[in-house]
Image (spheres, grey):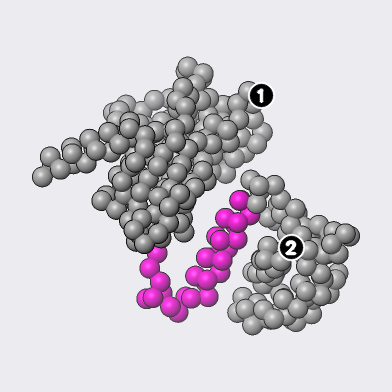
């Protein structure tokens, strides 16, 4: 059996346990056998046999390769995926990526019918090195070029985390120049050097908490989140319901005339740019400061013509 065949089987096990936690061995075995045609497309030398010993070996390999822990519950008499909320999010993205990878590989004869986005994020070649530095708490050095500045600056920083926003990757790090925690876009970061100088992660800084009420990559330090109420026309509202703007989104009104939602967010540039993208399909109802920002932006845009 090829490596691709094995990994495809691991993926099926994860999918089964994601769809039905606490599945028994017989349920997992039945699912694998029902998906035999799919597995054969990945590896035509595949055999149908799937034993308890095979499952235990696959569980070990899933943990080693993907970092996903599968455990057996004696109480519920079944296997389940043991993940924290953040680990579960990473797991979901991994499943999505592998589904896409397999689909594209199976559809090599269908390339005229599959159109991929030709814009690709830059700077991802540094992801592995940055993750290594973050995990081992090593200071880094790099060159950085801001879009609004002509000169390239040299930076030393303590890397804390990586964050994705709109197909771009950002490094969250404490800049040694002023000891402020900043975001650095990877597509503007070059000449990465991982030093052997260690640092201590600040006990008072919580990345999740810092971005809890932020849309995008900007995290204001002195601004309190505000209650935002938006009204969308029914058509745009369907998109907002299927892909909420933020985890704080709550639906206030949902009828044939409008979708009205409430969010709790800081009024950042990223948020304003996102709201402007909805054009006349959206109206800000609250707060007044945001209403004025959106109104002024639309008026300035109109003056361009």
- The residue nearer to you, when weighing 248 against 195, is 248
Residue 34 in the image, given as x and y percentages of width and height? 69, 81
Q: Where, by quadrant of the figure, is residue 186 drawn? A: top left
Is any part of residue 79 visible from this angle?
A: yes
Asked which quadrant contains residue 140, the reply is top right
- The spot of residue 263 in percent (x, y) is 46, 42
Q: Viewer-proximal residue, 119 or 254?
A: 254
Report if residue 133 is visible in the image.
no
Instruction: Classify mark 1: helix, strand or loop.
Output: loop
**SS for dot 2:** loop
Q: Main secondary structure of the magenta part?
A: helix
Give the tally of numbered discs.
2
Image quarter (top left, top right, bottom left or bottom right) of the N terminus? bottom right
User: In the rendered structure, which segment of residues is drawn in magenta?
Assistant: 89-118
Of 38 and 230, which appears nearest the observer?
A: 230
Q: Is 147 inside the magenta-drawn segment?
A: no
Residue 165 percent location from the top left of the image: 45, 44
Q: Nearer the viewer, residue 223 or 114?
A: 223
Label 2 Cα neighbours within 10 Å, binned few <14 / some 14-19 / many ≥20: some
Cα gap from disc 2 to disc 1, whole angstroms: 35 Å
Q: Residue furthest left?
A: 305
Which residue is depicted at the point 52% across and 65% down? 100
Q: Viewed as shown, does residue 158 lie left or right of 1?
A: left
From the viewer's perspective, is residue 168 above or below residue 134? below
User: Foreground mark, 2 or 1?
Assistant: 2
What residue is disc 1 on?
203
Task: Determine whether, in the image, residue 305 is placed left or right of residue 242.
Answer: left
Residue that carries the numbered disc 2 in the rendered image: 21
Left or right? Give the position of 295 relative to 88: left
Q: Is residue 116 above or below residue 39?
A: above
């Amino acid at each position: 059996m090829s490596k691709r065949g094995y990994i495809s089987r691991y993926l099926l096990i994860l999918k089964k346990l994601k769809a039905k936690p606490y599945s028994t061995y017989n349920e997992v075995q039945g699912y694998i056998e029902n998906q035999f045609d799919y597995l054969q497309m990945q590896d035509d030398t595949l055999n149908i046999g799937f034993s308890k010993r095979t499952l235990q070996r696959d569980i070990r390999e899933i943990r080693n390769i993907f970092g996903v822990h599968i455990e057996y519950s004696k109480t519920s008499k079944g296997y389940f995926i043991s993940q924290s909320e953040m680990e579960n999010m990473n797991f979901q993205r991994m499943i999505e990526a592998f589904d896409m990878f397999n689909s594209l590989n199976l559809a090599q004869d269908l390339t005229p019918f599959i159109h991929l986005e030709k814009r690709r994020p830059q700077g991802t070649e540094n992801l592995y090195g940055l993750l290594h530095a973050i995990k081992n708490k090593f200071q880094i050095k790099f060159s950085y070029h801001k879009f609004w500045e002509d000169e390239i600056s040299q930076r030393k920083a303590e890397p804390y985390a990586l964050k994705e926003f709109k197909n771009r990757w950002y490094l969250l790090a404490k800049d040694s120049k002023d000891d402020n925690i900043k975001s650095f876009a990877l597509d503007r970061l070059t000449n990465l050097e991982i030093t052997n100088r260690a640092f201590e992660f600040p006990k008072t800084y919580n990345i999740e908490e810092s971005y809890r009420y932020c849309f995008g990559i900007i995290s204001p330090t002195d601004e309190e989140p505000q209650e935002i109420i938006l009204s969308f026309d029914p058509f745009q509202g369907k998109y907002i319901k299927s892909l909420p703007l933020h985890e704080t989104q709550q639906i206030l009104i949902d009828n044939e005339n409008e979708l009205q939602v409430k969010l709790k967010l800081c009024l950042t540039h990223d948020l304003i740019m996102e709201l402007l993208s909805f054009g006349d399909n959206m109206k800000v109802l609250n707060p007044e400061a945001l209403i004025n920002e959106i109104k002024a932006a639309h008026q300035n845009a109109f003056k361009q013509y």
